[in-house]
Amino acid sequence: MAPLWIWLGALGLYALFSFWYVNWSGPLTTEEVDGFMARLEARAEETTPERLAVVRRFLENDDGKEFFMANLARLPKEPVADPNTGELRPAPEVLREYTGPFMRKLFGRAGHPAFFARAAGGYVEHWGVEADPGWSFVGMIRYRSRRDMAELAAHPSFGPIHAYKLVAMTHTLAFPATPGMAFFGPRVWLALLLGLAAAIIHILFGARG
């Protein structure tokens, strides 16, 4: 009988993970969208009316599912001035003053980096776009839902540290993307790890018997 509880325990752990990792609250309501937009518009100095309109359309078209934010960024090679002290510091170090707190709050909402890579060269193929600014890296960030993104974007703690992001990046481009294929992400590898652990414990339990 005991081996059954091993597998039920593994299944229970995965259920707890899924409860945290998957959005069970459904799409944003109209009231939620209006509330988030009011909070973002109150910080208009950090954005533009055009960007706010894009964000509103994205929130209004919420499907309640996860999405990925594609990010391109260029960091200057020369030191930049710390927005608080004026001290010259490497751009990646200054950027971490923003990304550190952001990533901690993102993880609390089941978000995480899904892909990161440093640029290895310039455009190999391009048309209809501006000249290559010399991107430094590309990254994909997983969000559990558009609600989580809106909560992070409107969080009051990011207002004071947004200046670090502005100073550290000379160019940036970001747009949301809906996954169109299966990703080998936490849902898959955690299930495999839990299954493997349960199988090993089952074998060890059987050997003792």
Image (spheres, grey):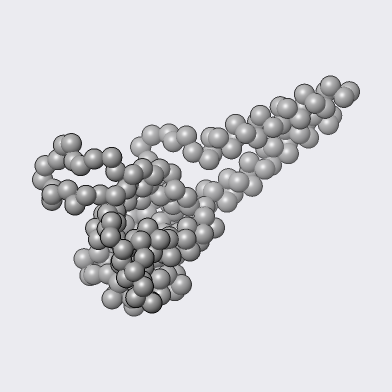
From the viewer's perspective, is residue 126 above or below residue 94?
Answer: above
Residue at the image position 34 percent from the left and 61 percent from the top: 91
Can residue 65 be seen here? The reply is no
Residue 102 position, x and y percent, is: 45, 61
Closer to the camera, 146 or 154? Answer: 154
From the viewer's perspective, is residue 14 above or below residue 56?
Answer: above
Residue 193 position, x and y percent, is: 62, 34
Residue at the image position 76 percent from the left and 30 percent from the top: 201
State left or right for residue 21 relative to residue 43. right
From the viewer's perspective, is residue 1 above or below residue 138?
Answer: above
Q: Quadrant of the C terminus?
A: top right
Closer to the camera, 66 or 133? Answer: 133
State left or right for residue 9 relative to residue 26. right
Residue lying furthest left: 128
From the viewer's perspective, is residue 110 above or below residue 196?
Answer: below
Choose top left, top right, bottom left or bottom right for residue 56: bottom left
Total marks placed = 0
Choose top left, top right, bottom left or bottom right for residue 58: bottom left
Residue at the image position 67 percent from the left and 43 percent from the top: 13
Can residue 45 be seen here? The reply is yes
Residue 175 position, x and y percent, is: 29, 52
Residue at the image position 66 percent from the left and 29 percent from the top: 196
Q: Quadrant of the N terminus?
A: top right
Residue 146 position, x and y percent, is: 40, 56
